[in-house]
Image (cartoon, rainbow, N blue to C red):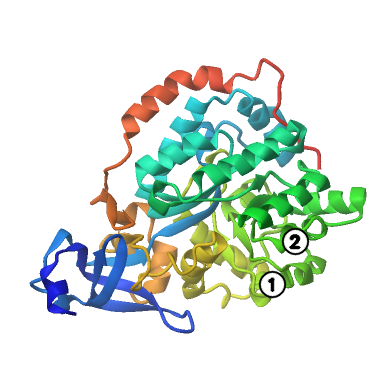
Amino acid sequence: MTPSAVESPAGLIITGCTVLTHDDQEEVGFLDNAAVVVRDGVVEEVTDAGAVAGRTADEWIDARGQVALPGLINCHTHAPMAALRGLAEDLPTEAWFNDVVWPVESNLTERDVTLGARLACAEMIRAGVTCFADHYFHMDAVAEVVAASGMRALLGEAYFSSQGPRGRERSLEFALRHRGAAGGRITTALAPHAPYTVDDADLATTADLARAHGLPVHLHAAENRDQTEASLARHGVTPVEVLHRTGILDTDVLIAHGTGIVESDLPLLAHARGRTAVATAPRGYLKFAWPTTTPVRALRDIGVPVGLATDGAASNNSLDVWESMALTSLIQKSTEGDPRWLTARQALHHATLQSARAVGLEGSVGRIAPGHRADLVLVDLTGPHTQPVHDLAATLVHSARAADVRTTVVDGRILMRDRRLLTVDVPGTVRELDERLPALVDRGHGRRIQEYDT
């Protein structure tokens, strides 16, 4: 440290905490009694707490008794659907879409999307989520909410082939207009909805556009086994094979769910020419009683990162990535019949580095390390449900809760401090949303934005 650096105040110093670290082999570890020094939104130094004594900073946090983690990443959600939380309950997938969600979504206005996204961002900030990948409608409004809330996001304007060429064009226009917005906190993707709602010609064109403009693709595919079986029966190919033959797997692609990925899909995913990742949101799969889950172990074995997600709050009821982390570990143990997989440290790896890879931000977020953006959270483990701590990784994954997050930081900016949310007006958002709900949830018109028939 040069004398000039000592004399110049840091933007933020966090001291006295335990920091989650990654070694050269990406193994998770912990550094006790540590300090994190942030300057210009970037982690400048991770050091011993004693090394920062006497330094000055614009913001200083005494984090004794807390653990500093990389901010959690919600790798697939529909943030505005927070406005539909609890509206479609105890239904099979087809009825959930056709009888409730798609009729209601035909009512959506840009203001509804704004309010739903505000509520979602507030929920995620309070739960230690610093970045999310969103795939929805009226995404200009979501981009504005992300910019105002201080979060980081990968955003895509969803489209169906039933919208004609204009839907695809709007997705591209949105991606180009907002790429790098909010001081670089917004990245963008093309967002065809799914192979069962977007035809092969549109998928192929989307792949061409993605390569031409250097954009990733974010879509649903092989969401469940029924979709895979229906695709095989009707077209003779799986949804993943559709992505292969249309060129989507030649792009950087984020696949939502993938519980219908079958063994014959694995070589296609393994040899995809683009960066391929899968987002898993296990709570929704349990709720819909899907018979399979994301094949995390098989994907790990072929080098495909699996990031953690919640899906939208209309299906998941929650945007709690802590819960997704614990459920992923538990469901994988049950599915594989092996209590040694997925371990707590492996779950933390999925929640941090693998999730950063999934959304295309490896090297920027996912670690608390010099040169990475200062996206981090402080977790208080002093409560009775997290004591005593015999195995810190297990405590974080299986005992800690979203409510244990005390402070959330993105790009070095404190968005929540000591549980006080600083960037979103929740009471005002809820009041206005309540006033709009009768018109939003009306299904008397008989319209749907799409038909679910896989």
Badges 2 and 1: C-beta atoms under 8 Å apart? yes
Q: Residue furthest top?
A: 444
The single residue placed furthest to the bottom in the displayed view is: 24
> Which residue occupies the foreground of this view, 189 or 33?
189
Q: Quadrant of the C terminus?
A: top right
Q: Is residue 439 left or right of residue 167?
A: left
- The answer to whether residue 66 shows anywhere in this view is yes
- Label 2 and label 1: CA atoms lie apart by 10 Å
Residue at the (58%, 75%) spot, across then down: 341
Q: The residue under label 1 is which amino acid type?
A: Ala
Where in the figure is residue 194, as x and y percent of width and height?
A: 72, 46
**216 left or right, relative to 70:** right
Which quarter of the picture shows residue 5? Answer: bottom left
**Residue 103 drawn at (x, y percent):** 67, 26
Height in image: 286 above or below 103?
A: below
For label 1, the crowd category at 10 Å Cα-Cα, with few meaning under 14, some 14 to 19 and many 20 or more, is: some
Position of residue 363 in the picture relative to residue 370 (left or right): right
Q: Which residue is mark 2?
A: 261
Element marked by disc 2 = loop
User: Callout 2: few (<14), some (14-19), or many (20+) C-alpha neighbours within 10 Å?
Assistant: many
Taking the image as drawn, is residue 119 in sight?
A: no
Tell me, for residue 298, which label it has, or none. Answer: 1
Quadrant of the image containing the N terminus: bottom left
